[in-house]
Image (spheres, grey):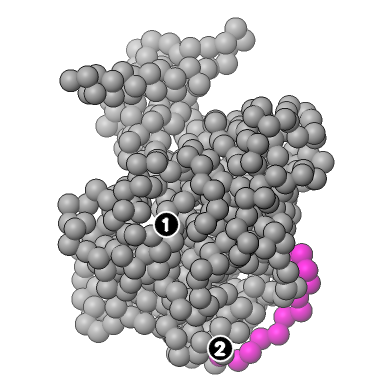
Amino acid sequence: MTNKPWLAAYPKEIPTSLEYENIPLQDYLTRSSKKYSNNTAIHFMGKDITFKEFHESALKFASYLQKLGVVKGDRVAIMLPNCPQSAIAYFGILYAGAIVVQTNPLYTERELHYQLSDSGAKAIISLDILFPRVTKAMNGTAIENIIITGIKDYLPFPKNLVYPFIQKKEHKLAVKVEHRGIHHVYTEIMKSTKPDPIHIAYEKGDIALLQYTGGTTGPPKGVELTHSNLISNTEMCSAWLYQTTDGEETIMGILPFFHVYGMTTVLIFAVMKGHKMVLIPKFDFKTALKDIDKQKPTLFPGAPTIYIGLLNHPDLEKYDLSSIKACISGSAALPIEVKEKFEAVTGGKLVEGYGLTETSPVAMANFVWDGLEKRGSIGVPWPDTDGCVLGPGSSEPLPVGEIGEIAIKGPQVMTGYWNRPDDTKESFRNGWFLTGDLGYMDEDGYFYVVDRKKDMIIASGFNVYPREIEEVLYEHPAILECIVAGVPDPYRGETVKAYIVLKEGYSITEKELDTYCRKQLAAFKVPKHYDFREDLPKTAVGKILRRTLVEEERKKLTEVQNSLKSS
């Protein structure tokens, strides 16, 4: 253990240690459905759903899963944007004793197939417009049942009547799924199933969620997060936001639930504390501004690109954002100018936090109220969380100010990677979880990230792993060598750039490569720039120097910025 110098900076309102109940996560919905029965739990595009309705729908979903043969420990996938069904299915799966597998709706058939195969999911709930992709991806997997739902299922009248026509126009298809065989319709499940209580034996250590994260080497891995992991991190969040009141806050639900940050800080936190969620299925800055103005959210977890987009919207001044009192930004570094401008516009506080999928996800943050705030810092460890900086191969913390790998201990740290004991073993050192991020700690216990040990790219809050893109590029017959890197981008934080050497006698355009990649990769992974070169920088043993290329881009950006300042 470290001596935890950061505890001296804690405001008196934040306990340094908390008590965590040994209960399954879904018990919090059961409690809130009784305590806040008629309070709005979910606001979705003009439709309000109470905690009582939320709870009953989750029980119906759980009962139906059991009828389909789902038992404790089975995996059930969710492939939905932020909508009532996403929240209902999440807790319904837990009530049934199963494990949630969150799946990004942007995934291609190839990416979805891998995740369904690796997790061994027996069932999936998906949007109707994704149905063709799911049916193709399920071949060779353990999927036995597909539950289909649509955005219109929870739209108020007359939006529910108009939406199918909009959908048909946008997606060039009208989806009709009949209730037979392995295909099931969500609305029929809600009509035909009773919300009977379900009792599943719970043991501490039971897994609640498999959250997939990529890696710079090898395929994506399923992070095992237990009920205890998620409960502890959400209780830490509650302690950090000590000026909030149970049952009285409204949380802006822009962060997708298929990302662990949105799942914990919006979905689980709201259910645990009895708060209202305002859900947006497809992020649109104009829609977000309207919802903030009308729904008056008080809490707004997000990512820098979200805040930047809102601040730069031409209609910003037409909307009232003054209800917002606290925001914790994650997924990427928060620029100081964005923080200051957003706080000026809202009158609330915007601070940077830090975490990973493997830490449920938050491990550190700056103080929202009171407490010392330091520019450029990711903050200090949360209650019951220990942090340090380790040197290569060492389990002893480095001295203050020395750069090494940031490591974490705490009740929110994962139990391991699904069916990957070797990867699990490599990610821990003497009980410390190795984050892969390089940084240092100052004399007050504040941490700073200086670089990523791993080559992961964070573009608009999405984790992008170069090797996955490189493997797709290398499959193209025209490509001899390639490497992918994250390069600075004023809006996305980082953007994906591919450096390519073509085989002799071959030619290909950027447009052709873009079309090729979009068939193989989710849109956020597709390179935004292609740089065709005669050769790539390499080490003496032939390893391509990714960092050299990134430094070239940073130098170019600095030169452009300097020329603009001097002009």
Secondary structure type for disc 1: strand
- Residue that badge 2 annotates: 35
Is residue 353 visible in the rendered image? The answer is: yes
Residue 54 sits inside the magenta stretch: no
Query: Residue at the location (25% across, 84% down)?
Result: 157
Q: Position of residue 463 (x, y in %)?
A: 49, 44
Look at label 1 and name its amino acid: Lys
Total numbered labels placed on residues in the image: 2
Look at label 2 and name its amino acid: Lys
Quarter of the picture holding the N terminus: top right
Q: Nearer the viewer, residue 5 or 145?
A: 5
Above or below — where is 61 with respect to 304? Answer: below
| Residue found at the very far right of the displayed protein | 430
Q: Residues within 10 Å of mark 2 (few under 14, many from 20)?
A: some
Above or below — where is 524 with respect to 241? Answer: above
Q: Residues within 10 Å of mark 1 (few under 14, many from 20)?
A: many
Q: Position of residue 403 (x, y in %)?
A: 64, 28
Region in magenta: 195-209
Quarter of the picture holding the C terminus: top left
Above or below — where is 429 with respect to 69? Answer: above
Query: Is 489 left or right of 137, judged from the image as shown?
Result: left
Q: Which mark is residue 452?
A: none
Q: Quadrant of residue 509?
A: top left
Q: Position of residue 240 (x, y in %)?
A: 57, 61
- Residue that badge 1 annotates: 349
By secondary structure, the bulk of the magenta-drawn segment is best described as loop
